[in-house]
Image (cartoon, helix red, strand yellow):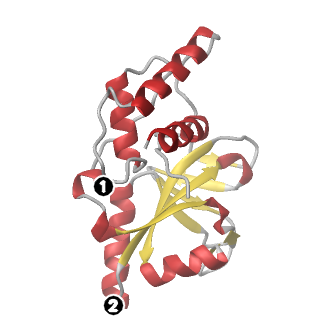
Amino acid sequence: MREGMFRRKRNNNHEANESQAIILWHGTTMSRAQSILRKGFRASGGKSYGIFLTQRPRTAFGYAESRARREKDEPALIMCMMDLGKYKYRCSGNVYNFKHDRISSEVVLRISDTAQIPQQDLFNPIMTLSFHSSCAAIAYWINSSGLSNGNHIVADHPAVIAVKQWLVSQANAGKSGVVPDGEVLRIAVDFFSTFS
């Protein structure tokens, strides 16, 4: 499965009219996570209730722990790539309520047993990459995203250098600002899998 990073988005109310992929998290139990992987997300109260995801793994982690205690199960975090242009949703703070009764499991990037996630990774600040980000920022991004599978990589890692070269080529082609999540995720996954 692909893995990735996430960034802050401040819009409050949206219809499915733009295409922008971001990483969001869903906290649940391990048995429910396995069901989501097989059948996709299903809103317990139908479309009127919605499907909730968050930009912050810390928020999802709290919900996963609470639900796991109630259901006597193991907590799990689901990392998803959501193209906001394809869904109706409402955003309140860092929580997205998708107004759909079902969402395909194709959005799932990774399911993690919360015991396997280092606590510092749950509390890392939300960060984005720009087309002028340094190698240190890229290494931090990769380490925070889970692409390194818990192995701490440094700024001179070949994958980091390859991503930096790609960013420079894009900046030289006239791109500026924040790199869209979906774009940087695809590039980082390709480079990291080549050099790991």
Crowding at mark 1 (Cα within 10 Å: few <14, some 14-19, many 20+): some
Looking at the image, tell me whether mark 1 or mark 2 is earlier in sequence order. 2
Question: In the orientation shown, which residue stands out farthest toward the bottom?
Answer: 72
Label 2 element class: loop
Side of 94 where 104 appears, left or right: right
Q: Quadrant of the C terminus?
A: top left
Label 1 element class: helix
**Badge 1 vs badge 2, beta-carbon distance below 8 Å:** no
Q: Tell which of 7 and 49 is nearer to you.
A: 7
The quadrant where residue 169 appears: top right
Report the amino acid beneath label 1. Leu
Residue 159 rendering spot, x and y as whole percentages: 44, 33
The quadrant where residue 140 appears: top left
Residue at 62 percent of width and 48 percent of height: 13
Q: Quadrant of the N terminus?
A: bottom right
Instruction: Determine which residue is flagged by label 1.
Output: 122
Instruction: Determine which residue is flagged by label 2.
Output: 72
Residue 49 rendering spot, x and y as whole percentages: 60, 73
Residue 178's label in the rendered image is none
Report the amino acid beneath label 2. Lys
Residue at 34 percent of width and 43 percent of height: 143
Q: Is residue 35 above or below residue 15?
A: below
Q: Is residue 44 above or below residue 179?
A: below
Q: Is residue 34 above or below residue 109?
A: below
